[in-house]
């Protein structure tokens, strides 16, 4: 394999060796503009509305949130919007009518979440959002991983695995969300710096495993000799992997994903997946509830908290598994890595 350019190798190595789960304030902007710390009303309850609980990433977020709620003294109710904008709004309306202490949301889409945020604003209930940012409304804080950098990390990792040349496919997430848009932006901008790598197909699969299986199956019919695949989350990477396995291409076609779910870690360990830009959902759940506890206590919090992921390959997957166990997240560690 040809030697990777020094600057890019350094960037990839830095992503592999450094995992930062402490937030950094980016200042107030967009939905977080004008954020206030909330008031210490003595109401330590919070409702967490998940976009879905059919995705292992969000199940793990919920587990981390519940774990931190017990430590922070927050009475937490976790609700499932089932990827429905109307269900998410109804759940928010119900929580607000019950005068919940704080509303925590993971928007189904960035646009639709605005109604829930503004409704809570009018009721003087602090709102925390994570992972996907609402288009408008006032938040006490937004917490999420750096999606643009995640895309860049994936591009560099995929390029490295291919010796900086070859044909690739990009499978995008739910394009109505800032996360999908930013991961795609970061990936496309970075992969464009490798002139000998050509993207022959790009298609959205909405962060869904079954859709990604169909998308990848169709792409392979048109492009049977591709060299690499980037999937914007690991659920889609698993769908792509199933399609690759059906053609005996697993491990031959380099596959890079994002999130670090258990199935992806197992695939990295067995060599059927090259890498995942791991963004611990459990740690995300812990962080958002920790900040919610601060808001409910009347403490000032940053308008935005940005978390950094970790590029995980076969060389460091066991170390990452130990990290997850260390924060209490053994459920997201494959049995072979515990």
Image: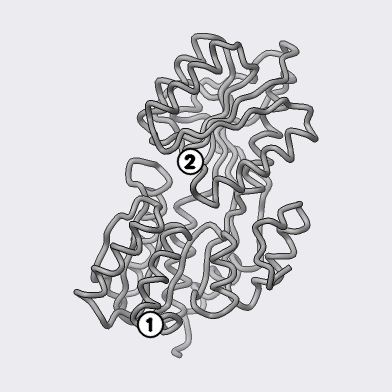
Q: Earlier in the sequence, mark 2 or mark 1?
A: 2
Quadrant containing the N terminus in the rendered view: bottom left
- Left/right placement of residue 226 relative to residue 74 reads left
The secondary element bearing badge 2 is classed as loop
Residue 287 pos. (x, y %): 67, 40
Say above or below: 183 vs 237. above
Q: Which of the numbered marks, if any, corresponds to residue 64?
A: none
Residue 200 spot, x, y in % from top left? 24, 71
Q: Residues within 10 Å of mark 1 (few under 14, many from 20)?
A: some
Residue ID at (39%, 53%):
208
Q: Mark 1 sits on what residue?
A: 249
Q: Which residue is drawn at 35% across and 72% down?
A: 243
Quadrant location of the C terminus in the rendered image: bottom right
The residue closer to the viewer here, 213 or 74, is: 213
The residue indicated by pointer 2 is 52
Which of the 4 image quadrants contains residue 335?
bottom right
């Amino acid at each position: 394999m040809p030697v990777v350019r020094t600057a890019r190798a350094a960037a990839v190595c830095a992503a592999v060796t450094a995992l930062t789960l402490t937030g950094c304030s980016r200042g107030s902007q967009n939905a977080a503009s004008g954020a206030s710390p909330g008031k210490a009303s003595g109401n330590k309850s919070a409702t967490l509305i998940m976009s879905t609980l059919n995705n292992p990433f969000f199940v793990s977020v919920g587990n981390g949130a519940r774990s931190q709620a017990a430590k922070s003294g927050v009475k937490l109710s976790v609700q499932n919007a089932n990827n429905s904008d109307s269900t998410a709004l109804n759940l928010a309306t119900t929580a607000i009518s019950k005068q919940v202490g704080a509303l925590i949301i993971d928007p189904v889409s960035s646009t639709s979440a605005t109604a829930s945020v503004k409704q809570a604003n009018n009721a003087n209930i602090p709102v925390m959002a994570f992972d996907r940012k609402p288009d408008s409304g006032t938040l006490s804080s937004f917490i999420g991983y750096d999606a643009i950098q995640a895309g860049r990390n994936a591009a560099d990792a995929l390029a490295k695995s291919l010796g900086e040349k070859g044909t690739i496919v990009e499978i995008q997430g739910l394009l109505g969300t800032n996360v999908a848009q930013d991961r795609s932006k970061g990936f496309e901008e970075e992969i464009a710096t490798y002139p000998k790598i050509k993207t022959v197909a790009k298609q959205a699969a909405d962060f869904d495993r079954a859709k990604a299986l169909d998308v990848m199956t169709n792409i392979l019919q048109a492009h049977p000799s591709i060299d690499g695949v980037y999937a914007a989350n690991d659920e889609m990477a698993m769908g792509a992997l199933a399609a690759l396995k059906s053609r005996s291409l697993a491990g031959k076609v380099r596959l890079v994903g994002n999130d670090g779910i258990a199935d992806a870690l197992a695939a990295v360990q067995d060599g059927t997946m090259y890498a995942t830009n791991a963004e611990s959902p459990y740690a995300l759940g812990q962080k958002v509830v920790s900040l919610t506890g601060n808001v409910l206590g009347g403490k000032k919090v940053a308008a935005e908290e940005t978390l950094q992921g970790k590029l995980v390959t076969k060389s460091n997957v066991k170390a990452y598994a130990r990290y997850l166990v260390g924060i209490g997240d053994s459920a997201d560690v494959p049995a072979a890595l515990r």
